[in-house]
């Protein structure tokens, strides 16, 4: 029987310490109850993300960012905020479309890279759970693959609800606990959920993530399925990836599969009519 490899500390390749392998159990009534969680670092995660961005970083193909902008029907003149923007790829693409695009991230190292690519872009170093912006300041707010890494995802959702306009849109994506090609396939092989080694990681179902967003004052309008390699170019690296991960061969078929079987859930939301997001701490 094959042993499951130990989780690694982000940016180091070394096994994580066991005492930080599991996140605390949520209290009864907590919207995050039932979501699978890992924790690899104590305290703040800024240092861990700075290590990640000093190394390989976290990036997506240009086609992905264009797809997100199409999804939210972004038009010139709108104010857009990308929360947890990393190196600012979406900010760059949004500005090229004529949007007033802003980016915020916990990692100053990531934003330094973003400023080199987009010197005029307004970037801010801040925690997504306490955004340094006024209420209803943006027409579009995005958060791509980051809410699952927050200390408090409900607080992160509440901040996005606070800064978006009443008729604006919030778009985010999070990992699906029941993703067929990712979590389910990994479970078949290893008898465990995958752990990508990020400082904090969570996997939830569509219903669980919907409860988190609702608790933060966001009303879900649409949910789409996404596979992380859908937008990758077909090149030698992609072919090597398919050889190492044969399930990637099924990615073209996933568009006909139910959303709840996709690896990643993309939520398009608006501020709930009854939203009374708490003031910043």
Image: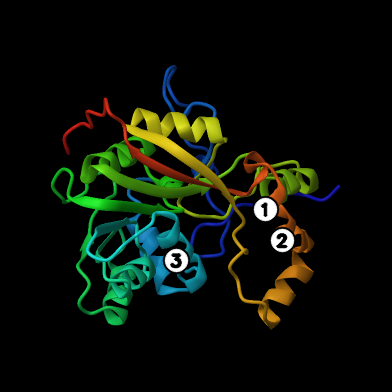
- Which disc is residue 65 wearing? 3
Q: Position of residue 49 (x, y in %)?
A: 39, 61
Q: Residue at x 71, y 61 (%)?
A: 252
**Disc 2 from disc 3: Cα separation:** 19 Å
Q: Earlier in the sequence, mark 2 or mark 3?
A: 3
**Disc 1 from disc 3: Cα separation:** 18 Å
- Is residue 112 shown above or below 12? below
Q: Closer to the observer: label 1 or label 3?
A: 1
Which residue position is annotated with label 2? Answer: 252
Which residue position is annotated with label 1? Answer: 255
Residue lying furthest left: 134
The answer to which of 52 and 7 lies nearer the viewer is 52
Q: Residue at x 51, y 57 (%)?
A: 9
The answer to which of 162 and 37 lies nearer the viewer is 162
Q: Quadrant of residue 165?
A: top left
- Is residue 44 shown above or below 244? above
Q: Are marks 1 and 2 in contact (CB under 8 Å)?
A: yes
Q: How many marks?
A: 3
Q: Position of residue 8 (x, y in %)?
A: 56, 56
**Disc 1 from disc 2: Cα separation:** 7 Å
């Amino acid at each position: 029987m094959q042993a499951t490899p130990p989780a690694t500390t982000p940016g180091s390749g070394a096994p994580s310490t066991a005492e930080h392998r599991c996140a605390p159990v949520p209290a009864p009534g907590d919207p995050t109850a039932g979501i699978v969680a890992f924790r690899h670092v104590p305290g703040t995660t800024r240092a861990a993300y700075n290590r990640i961005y000093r190394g390989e970083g976290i990036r997506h193909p240009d086609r992905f960012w264009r797809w997100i902008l199409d999804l939210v029907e972004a038009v010139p003149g709108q104010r857009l905020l990308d929360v947890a923007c990393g190196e600012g790829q979406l900010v760059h693409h949004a500005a090229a479309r004529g949007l007033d695009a802003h980016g915020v991230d916990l990692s100053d190292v990531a934003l330094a890279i973003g400023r080199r690519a987009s010197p005029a872009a307004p970037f801010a170093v801040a925690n997504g759970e306490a955004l340094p912006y006024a209420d209803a300041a943006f027409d579009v707010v995005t958060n791509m693959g980051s809410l699952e890494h927050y200390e408090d995802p409900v607080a992160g959702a509440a901040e996005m609800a606070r800064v978006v306009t009443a008729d604006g849109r919030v778009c985010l994506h999070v990992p699906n606990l029941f993703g067929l090609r990712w979590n389910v396939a990994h479970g078949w092989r290893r008898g465990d959920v995958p752990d990508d080694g990020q400082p904090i990681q969570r996997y939830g179902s569509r219903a669980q993530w919907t409860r988190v967003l609702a608790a933060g004052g966001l009303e879900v309008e649409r949910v789409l399925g996404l596979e992380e390699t859908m937008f990758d170019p077909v090149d030698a690296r992609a072919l090597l990836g398919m050889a190492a991960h044969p399930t990637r061969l099924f990615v073209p078929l996933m568009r006909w599969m139910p959303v709840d079987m996709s690896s990643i859930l993309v939520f398009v939301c608006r501020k709930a009519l009854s939203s009374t997001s708490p003031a910043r701490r």
